[in-house]
Image: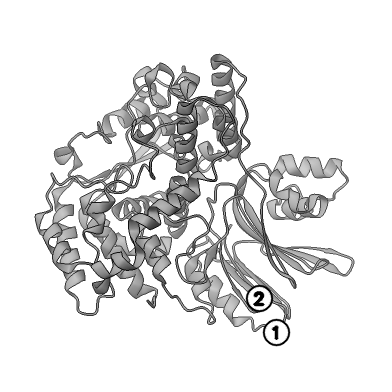
């Protein structure tokens, strides 16, 4: 199920052509290509996906739902509703959601275990409800007009509405050049466009917009001992994997702890052969060099796990030309400049997977909650966003005019302080525990959304569904209060998780040092990005021109080598990705017709 859009306005009669154009722009191709609409004088709702919209009629009143995403506990909710007397169709997630709303009101959102963006029309109360899953794994953008609201699950769908013009203000430029490829929660970058916060819902009626949070982390003292905690973690991970497993799913296998564990659990639980898939790059066997972020390649560990699992395995090998060319399609998929070739690799991998299976299971989202990232272990972390490194190097490529306008260091610091002010600290906890709680919160609310958007956008553009069992909200709620000393057991990143999964994996895989999503080490990529950057910035029509210091970008590109070390965003975004990001910014400004 995917792709929703709508338009509600209480003061004028609406034409239905915009909603059809918006759904046509949906970035998630559906098998079968079904589209559905619900049209009234003041309300237009649309969805790309089978059996939508879902409708329940009670007397003269109608309740209409459009939904993008997946629900992993439909049976549990339906059972509870049936016991309460509801005549729910337990085979239909959408019908179950509508009955849940009728029974619990807006509290129904707390019952849902899944990833979603949704819009629900309550005719009796003459209101629209927009909602998003707890982590924001599915996107939902909106803009307000006089007496109206327009929304869509992708930016390109929203921009298909004729009333919306894409404009970029100084604050939007700061989001692109100081925060990007991350974004401040709720920020739609373009002027007047917002993104509904994760774990939030919005009610729009004739009195306007009211925003609410239905999910927040609850902070309290963790009472369980280490072995009991490890047992709880094991149970939660097994249950999340069972809920998201499907007979037609394949597993994205890197040979690391997280993906290997999920694959092994599925093999153990379902007792049948599993399909595994990995990604590599042409030339990496020759050109890979270990570093602090990537201490080793995946290939040997993939072979170890496929032998252990006796899985049906294939490897997708990506070559430099297709990786570079896909930079543009990656922007179209994300609707923003993103993680450069880290995005385009995921897009190419997703297309490759989609030709084999409709659903992929990924080990993403364990590092955020079990303490896997390097910045959890750096003593200097915690003074700014720990993944936003070397901002001064990045700003050297920007024009003085842009820097004077956006004041990037001040903007980034203000956003950091805003994020820290939200942290629900435990009163009286030791300073080091408070520091780690802060880093955990920043990672969950400011870093993870970049990866979730990448997963949703790239897989969706390929017509693939990716599921991440480690992102189950029950795991997150539990891990939030587990002390750092337990997470860092055995003085190892994700020590608690490793201990909890003892016996599930071979020891050499169980205790393998963390290695992130692989990227290309082929020097041909540097040559290709250098050439593409020069072509881009030398184009007299480039909208990027007033935003960069052209001479400095030329110098940076000319001197770029395999040894250049300018990490600037997370573990994988280094000097080549900085240039590729500028190329993506230029393309985004052109492709989306952004006015500045």
Of the pair 280 and 330, the residue shown nearer to us: 330
**Quadrant occupied by the C terminus:** bottom left
Total marks placed: 2
Q: Position of residue 21 (x, y in %)?
A: 54, 77
The 10 Å Cα crowd at callout 1, few under 14, some 14 to 19, many 20 or more, is few
- For the residue pair 72 and 496, the one nearer the viewer reads as 496
Q: Which residue extends farthest left?
A: 559
Q: Secondary structure at mark 1?
A: loop
Residue 541, x across and y down, in percent: 24, 79
Label 2 to label 1, Cα distance in Å? 9 Å
On residue 422, which mark appears? Answer: none
Examine the image and state in which quarter residue 458 appears.
Answer: bottom left
Residue 361 at least partly seen = no
What residue sits 32% from the left and 65% below the top? 585
> In the displayed structure, does residue 188 sit left or right of residue 314?
right
Residue at 49% across, 21% down:
486
Q: Check contact, mark 2 vs mark 1: CB within 8 A.
A: yes
When the figure is inspected, residue 294 is found, relative to residue 432, above or below; the finding is below
Q: Quadrant of the N terminus?
A: bottom right
Q: As rendered, which of 243 and 491 lies closer to the eye?
A: 491
* Residue bearing the label numbered 2: 148
Find disc 1 in the rendering and name its residue: 12
Q: In the picture, residue 404 is in which quadrant?
A: bottom left
- Dot 2 or dot 1: first in sequence order is 1
- Residue 401 shows in the view: yes
Residue under the point 39% across and 33% down: 376
Few, some or many residues within 10 Å of mark 2 (<14, 14–19, 20+): many
Question: Is 275 rendered above or below residue 486?
Answer: below
Q: Residue 538: where, in percent of width, then height?
A: 16, 73
- Secondary element type, mark 2: strand
């Amino acid at each position: 199920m995917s792709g929703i859009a709508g338009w509600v306005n209480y003061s004028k009669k609406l034409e239905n052509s915009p909603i059809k154009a918006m759904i046509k722009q949906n970035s998630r191709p559906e098998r079968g290509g079904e589209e559905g609409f619900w049209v009234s004088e003041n309300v237009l709702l649309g969805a790309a996906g089978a059996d939508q919209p879902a409708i329940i009629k009670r007397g003269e009143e109608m309740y209409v739902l459009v939904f993008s995403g997946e629900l992993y506990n439909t049976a549990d909710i339906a059972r509870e509703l049936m016991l309460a007397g509801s005549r729910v169709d337990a085979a239909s997630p959408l019908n179950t959601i509508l009955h849940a709303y009728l029974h619990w009101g807006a509290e129904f959102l707390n019952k849902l275990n899944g990833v979603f963006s949704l819009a629900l029309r309550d005719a009796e109360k003459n209101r629209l409800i927009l909602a998003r899953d707890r982590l924001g794994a599915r996107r939902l953008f909106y803009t307000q007009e006089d007496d109206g609201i327009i929304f869509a699950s992708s930016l390109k769908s929203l921009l298909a509405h004729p009333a919306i013009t894409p404009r970029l203000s100084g604050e939007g430029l700061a989001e692109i050049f100081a925060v990007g490829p991350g974004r401040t929660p709720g920020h739609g970058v373009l002027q007047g466009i917002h993104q509904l916060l994760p774990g939030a819902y919005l009610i729009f009626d004739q009195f306007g917009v009211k925003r609410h949070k239905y999910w927040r982390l609850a902070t309290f003292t963790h009472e369980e001992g280490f072995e009991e905690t490890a047992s709880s973690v094991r149970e939660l991970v097994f249950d999340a994997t069972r809920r998201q497993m499907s007979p037609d799913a394949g597993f994205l296998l890197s040979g690391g702890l997280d993906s290997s564990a999920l694959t092994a659990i599925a093999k153990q639980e379902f007792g049948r052969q599993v399909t595994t898939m990995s990604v590599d790059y042409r030339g990496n066997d020759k050109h890979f060099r270990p570093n602090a972020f990537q201490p080793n390649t995946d290939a040997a560990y993939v072979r170890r796990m496929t032998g252990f699992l006796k899985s049906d395995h294939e490897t997708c090998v990506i070559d430099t030309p297709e990786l570079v060319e896909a930079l543009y399609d990656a922007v179209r998929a994300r609707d923003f400049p993103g993680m450069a070739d880290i995005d385009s690799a995921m897009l190419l991998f997703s297309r490759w997977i989609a030709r084999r299976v409709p659903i992929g299971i990924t080990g993403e989202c364990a590092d955020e909650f079990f303490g896997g990232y390097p910045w959890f272990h750096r003593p200097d972390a915690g003074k700014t966003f720990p993944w936003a490194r070397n901002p001064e190097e990045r700003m050297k490529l920007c024009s003085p005019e842009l820097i004077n306008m956006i004041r990037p260091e001040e903007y980034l610091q203000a956003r950091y302080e805003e994020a820290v002010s939200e942290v629900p600290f435990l009163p009286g906890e030791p300073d080091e525990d408070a520091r780690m709680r802060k880093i955990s919160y920043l990672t969950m609310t400011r870093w993870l959304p970049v990866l979730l958007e990448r997963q949703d956008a790239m897989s969706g553009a390929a017509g693939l569904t990716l599921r991440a069992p480690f992102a189950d909200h029950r795991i997150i709620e539990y891990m939030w209060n587990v002390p750092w000393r337990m997470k860092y057991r055995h003085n190892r990143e994700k020590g608690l998780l490793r201990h909890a999964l003892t016996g599930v994996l071979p020891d050499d895989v169980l205790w393998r040092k963390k290695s992130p999503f692989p990227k290309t080490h082929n020097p041909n990529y540097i040559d290709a990005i250098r050439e593409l950057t020069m072509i881009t910035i030398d184009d007299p029509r480039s909208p990027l021109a007033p935003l960069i210091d052209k001479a400095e970008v030329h110098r940076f590109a000319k001197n770029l080598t395999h040894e250049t070390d300018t990490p600037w965003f997370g573990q994988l975004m280094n000097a080549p990705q900085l240039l590729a990001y500028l190329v993506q910014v230029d393309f985004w400004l052109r492709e989306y017709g952004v006015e500045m």
